Image: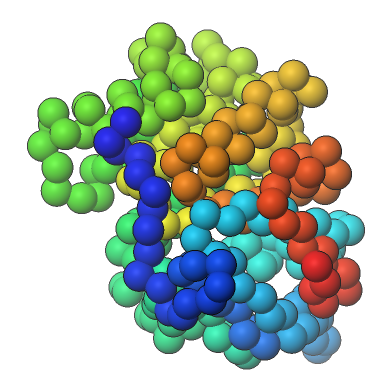
Amino acid sequence: MSTITSGAAQPGAKSEGGETVVSVRDVRRVYRRDNFDIEVLNGIHFDVQAGDFVALMGPSGSGKSTLLNLLAGIDRPTAGRILVAGNDITSFNESQLAPWRHRHIGFIFQFYNLIPVLTARENVELPLKLVKLSKEERRRKVETALAVVGLQDRMDHFPRQLSGGQEQRVAIARAVVTDPTLLLADEPTGDLDAKSAQEVLDLLAQLNAEFGKTIVMVTHDPRAAERARRILRLDKGRLEE
């Protein structure tokens, strides 16, 4: 399984826990609606070490998904700094963010976001088309990623031919096929039945324990959060551990 490795990053700092993959410093996010400022995040400050598995919990509207989008460089903070894999992404422009995100971020969505007219193989291959690889290299990486999630026998199935749990596993394969530094999961079990949710959580735990992938997962489910190594709680824009 040479495609998926320990995902070692170029750290921005070191700590007793090892390399610091994520460093968030005094981050605020304020949205302007009509004539009102809505403060979603206020003074967020935390680190994530290489190989950690962090669950981010909190009530609806507490800013969990906003924080995840900031870590992915999809959104920008109003104030503060965010370093991921040694890069101060708050200083990047859009042309710098796109290649950085492709190299370092794997995003897992609640509703899979698979393209329905593409097979599992083709969905997983999409991120690899942004880099220079031979057709054989792409094929090998895709097959390895699908084998890791246990779907090597479903490569040529379309999303409509898969269960919800299988679709999410295809989405996870797509997220890890580039061997990113950081996996971000936004309610990855929120649309699944209990059995499929357990299988997806088992897979995330395996990616963390066996492959050393660093994971930050947003969840409202305490049972899902228990699979993480750390739990961070957001409430009214502030963070507690």
Q: Considering depth in this image, is 173 or 203 the residue closer to the camera? A: 203
How many marks do you count on the picture? 0
Residue 187 in percent (x, y) is at 70, 45
Model colouring: rainbow
Residue reaching furthest to the left: 134
On screen, residue 126 above or below 49: above
Residue 227 picture quarter: top right
Residue 124 picture quarter: top left
**Residue 89 visible in the current orientation:** no
Q: Residue at x 61, y 38 (%)?
A: 205
Identify the image quadrant of the N terminus. top left
Residue 31 in percent (x, y) is at 72, 80
Q: Residue at x 56, y 73 (%)?
A: 16
Q: Considering depth in this image, is 207 or 179 the residue closer to the camera? A: 207
Residue reaching furthest to the front: 16
Q: Residue at x 71, y 35 (%)?
A: 189
Identify the image quadrant of the C terminus. bottom right
On screen, residue 238 above or below 141: below
In this image, 86 relative to 25: left or right?
A: left
In this image, 6 relative to 125: left or right?
A: right
**Residue 13 visible in the current orientation:** yes
Q: Considering depth in this image, is 95 or 49 the residue closer to the camera? A: 49
Residue 52 picture quarter: bottom right
Residue 119 in percent (x, y) is at 39, 21
Residue 199 in percent (x, y) is at 65, 24
Q: Residue at x 55, y 85 (%)?
A: 81
On screen, residue 95 above or below 124: below
